[in-house]
Image: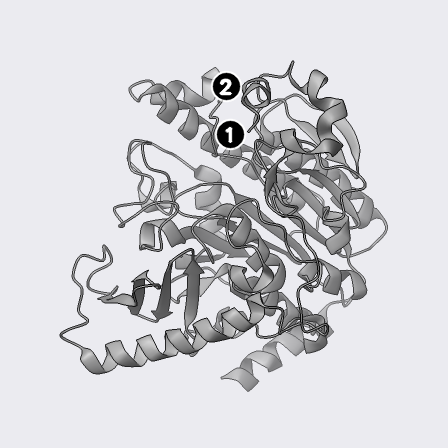
């Protein structure tokens, strides 16, 4: 089957008149839960453009963020590694400069690389502010030629950083970054240069602010839920405009668009954000880790819906496989796998487990079975069969002692390897070089000259007064 697929792939590339490398676009929302799409029959939210994308590509019904919060998942996208290996233990941690990223690898392979939106990998906490040009953990330091970015979540009328230059914009977060990404795409398309574009939106993360039209259909909900869902309406609309323009430019056939969210859905938003799953953002239950995901590549992918378990750690290995990147472009161990073989083949079983570690908890996905570490310190584990119990309500560890012990041993072995990574054993230096510690930007001396002006902006005013 592998040889058959490789034959199809090789035949495709040699049949193209221009033998072009595929353009690659990664799109990620911020705090969109697994249940928050129209194609999952959400009771109030309609997402016609995500639904259309799902009808034209691969819809993953079991796709996982590598962690139940934002920064760690973003680190996994860029590296193909579990977040703790990269030093991004939780939100606001900096990605180690010793890591190798997909942007760096594609840049070497001739791609023009751009980042648009939320970064959150430079050690700064608090609402998103423009990233400073001399920040030694800005997107440019990790392989992005052009970056139009903020440190963290951002909302309507954002203040952005265009490679270090502060620019004030009007409009929703998704409208602004999709428009700027299109400018970048236009330039590279004119130059006949393949592009790698990362679009990380700030929606639907708090503070929720939607325009009246977008939230009007949710008038029976509480105010926060109205605005939260209104932000998703705006994202879906702008995604639709973006995909339409990609088609009109004549580049959609050979453009990969990979969409997902960065973690599970939120508590306190109604109706439910997680589609009936257990847990929410911050937990390693399905509701905290499972997210909506779609891959669209018209010239190579036929529509299908799959239960094949996959994760954000698979993004780098998959793209590396498609482009033919050398293994030397990655830091090992890699925790993800290439999904290329299952693009147009019905592969039911995943041969490599999907591991998670977050604070004192963890999990291991073995196809339909999921081992959950409710406390690593106290060695407390549970086992679930997700095929018959997707809500994780029946711990089957006692009834399946052999499988339980096998998966627990596998997890503990992996956990030890992560400890080695945390201590820098994966790097040529055999140690971790100095990295910034997580802190709030309003307590950072580099941002002190901007505090007076920032305090006039509603998204920063209260945070500056509080100092966090």
Quarter-of-image position of residue 297: bottom right
Residue 74, image x, y percentages = 57, 52
| Nearer to me, 305 or 350 | 350
Relative to 427, is 57 on the left or the right?
left
- The tag on residue 211 is 2
Considering only order in the chain, which callout, 2 or 1, is on the residue closer to the N terminus? 2
Q: SS for tag 1?
A: helix
Relative to 351, is 96 on the left or the right?
right
Does residue 412 sit above or below 306 in this rendering?
Answer: below
| Nearer to me, 72 or 413 | 413
> Is residue 335 at least partly visible in the picture?
no
Label 2: how many residues lie within 10 Å, few (<14), some (14-19) or many (20+)? some
Q: Residue at x 37, y 40 (%)?
A: 38
What residue is shown with label 1? Answer: 234
Relative to 363, is 237 on the left or the right?
right
Does residue 235 sit above or below 296 in this rendering?
Answer: above
Outermost right residue:
191
Residue 331, image x, y percentages = 65, 71
Q: Residue at x 45, y 41 (%)?
A: 31
- The tag on residue 194 is none
Does residue 438 sit above or below 448 in this rendering?
Answer: below
Q: SS for tag 2?
A: loop
Q: Quadrant of the C terminus?
A: top right
Residue 15, image x, y percentages = 71, 72
Quarter-of-image position of residue 272: top left
| Nearer to me, 192 or 418 | 418
Labelled pair 1, 2 in contact (Cβ < 8 Å):
yes
Residue 253, image x, y percentages = 64, 56
């Amino acid at each position: 089957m592998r040889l058959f697929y490789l034959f199809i792939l090789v035949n495709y590339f040699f049949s193209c008149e221009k033998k072009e490398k595929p353009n690659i676009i990664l799109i990620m929302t911020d705090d969109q839960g697994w249940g928050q799409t129209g194609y999952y029959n959400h009771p109030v939210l309609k997402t016609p453009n995500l639904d259309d994308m799902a009808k034209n590509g691969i819809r993953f019904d079991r796709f996982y963020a590598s962690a139940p919060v934002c920064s760690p998942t973003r680190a996994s996208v860029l590296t193909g590694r579990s977040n703790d290996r990269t030093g991004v233990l939780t939100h606001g941690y900096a990605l180690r400069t010793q890591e190798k990223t997909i942007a760096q690898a594609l840049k070497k392979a001739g791609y023009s690389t751009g980042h648009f939106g939320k970064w959150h990998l430079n050690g700064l906490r608090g609402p998103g502010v423009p990233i400073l040009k001399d920040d030694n953990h800005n997107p440019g330091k990790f392989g992005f030629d052009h970056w139009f970015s903020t440190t963290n979540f951002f909302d309507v009328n954002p203040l952005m950083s265009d490679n270090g230059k502060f620019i004030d914009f009007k409009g929703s977060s998704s409208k602004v970054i999709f428009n700027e990404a299109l400018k970048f795409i236009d330039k590279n398309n004119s130059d006949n240069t393949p592009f790698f574009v990362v679009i990380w939106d700030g929606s639907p993360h708090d503070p929720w602010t939607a325009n009246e039209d977008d939230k009007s259909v949710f008038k029976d909900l509480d105010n926060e839920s109205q605005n939260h869902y209104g932000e998703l309406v705006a994202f879906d609309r702008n995604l639709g405009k973006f995909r339409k323009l990609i088609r009109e430019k004549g580049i959609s056939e050979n453009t990969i668009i990979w969409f997902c969210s960065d973690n599970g859905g939120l508590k306190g938003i109604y109706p439910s954000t997680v589609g009936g799953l257990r847990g929410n953002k911050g937990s390693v239950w399905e509701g905290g880790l499972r997210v909506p995901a779609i891959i669209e590549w018209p010239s190579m992918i036929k529509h299908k819906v799959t239960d094949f378990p996959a994760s954000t750690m698979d993004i780098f290995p998959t793209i590396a496989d498609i482009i033919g990147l050398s293994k030397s472009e990655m830091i090992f161990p890699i925790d993800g796998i290439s999904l290329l073989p299952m693009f147009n083949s019905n592969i039911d079983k995943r041969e490599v487990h999907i591991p998670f570690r977050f604070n004192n908890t963890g999990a291991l996905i073995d196809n339909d079975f999921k081992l959950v570490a409710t406390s690593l310190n106290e060695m407390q584990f549970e086992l679930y069969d997700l095929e018959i119990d997707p809500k994780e309500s029946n711990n089957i560890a006692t009834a399946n002692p052999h499988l339980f012990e096998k998966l627990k041993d596998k997890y503990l072995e992996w956990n030890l390897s992560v400890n080695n990574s945390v201590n820098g054993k994966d790097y040529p230096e055999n140690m971790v070089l100095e990295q910034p510690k997580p802190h709030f930007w309003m307590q950072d001396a580099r941002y002190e000259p901007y505090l007076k002006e920032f305090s006039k902006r509603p998204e920063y005013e209260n945070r500056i007064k509080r100092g966090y």
